[in-house]
Amino acid sequence: MRQYLLFDLDRTLWDFDGNAERTYRAMFDSFGLKALCGVCFETFHERYRIINDTLWEAYRNGTISKEMLSLRRFSLTLADFGCDAESAEIVHLSRKMSDYYVVEGTRQTGLMPGARELLDWLAERRDRYCLAVITNGFSEAQLPKMKSSGIDRYFDYFFLSEDIGFMKPDRRFFEAALRRMGVGAERCLVIGDDYKVDIAGAMAVGIPQVWYNPKAIALADAALPPTYEVRHLAEVKDIFETRIVLP
Ligand SMILES: [Mg+2]
């Protein structure tokens, strides 16, 4: 009987931070943001990241729309450097930056260390493992990203929050994935980098988890430990190999 491995995409397989930084750097230059904001790329980017994370949290909680997130992450960053976020000119520029990010960002091909090797190793064992992607990212970005980096071919299922109608860590996201695959939680394993989103979400529906924690982030005192924790994706193979035999 095959085991179902549910992989998060951003920061678990796809090097979100490295790829995004390359894209933002190119954007910073091509939109002349140094002259407009009067700061270097690093300062701009650091501010952007904080704003983007805050807006993503709001998007996950349903308090802002996807369109609002796409636009405001740029207009609010520009506003922090003296631009008027409400002006037609800045709204227009933010929209162009947003479009640029979707197009150029999804062309990036960087993967997390060991991701390709792990997927190749699993591909040789297709009789034992069935692979799925579980992701909250925008649908128009996630599949192109996987295609550009050549990892789409490894997967049997793609579970995108926009298609499912719920975002991780909402248990309904995981329940929908289990239903579509026609398997119980005990036959699955979720592998993800975000404790709150991937690990706690899987835990709530009884799916065992592998917390990919390359930066060795400490777990909050009240948080339940994940089933497994690894620093490098190469260690995930050992878990698959030594795990108790499934029913
Ligand atoms: Mg992630």
Image: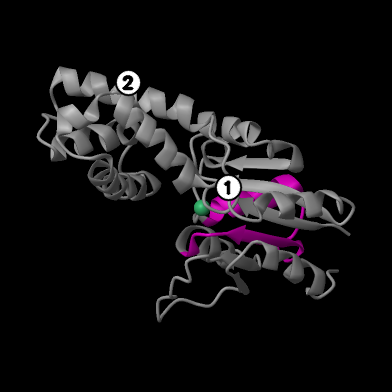
Which residue was labeled with disc 1?
9
Could you tell me the amino acid type at mark 2? Lys
Count of all numbered marks drawn on residues in the image: 2
Q: CA distance from mark 2 to mark 1?
A: 25 Å
Residue named by callout 2: 96
State whether label 1 is within 8 Å of ligand 1.
yes
Give the residue drawn at x 65%, y 32%.
147
Amino acid type, residue under disc 1 in the picture: Leu
Circles 2 and 1 in contact, beta carbons < 8 Å: no
Q: Which mark is residue 213?
A: none
Q: Which residues are magenta?
A: 171-195
Where is residue 182? Give x, y as percent: 77, 50
Q: Find numbered disc 2 in the image and state the secondary structure of the residue it sits on.
A: helix
Please tell me whether residue 137 is drawn above or below residue 148 in the rendered image. below
Q: Secondary structure at mark 1?
A: loop
Q: Earlier in the sequence, mark 2 or mark 1?
A: 1
| Residue at the image position 24 percent from the left and 41 percent from the top | 44
| Residue 137 image position (x, y, % from top left) | 49, 40
Residue 66 seen in render: no
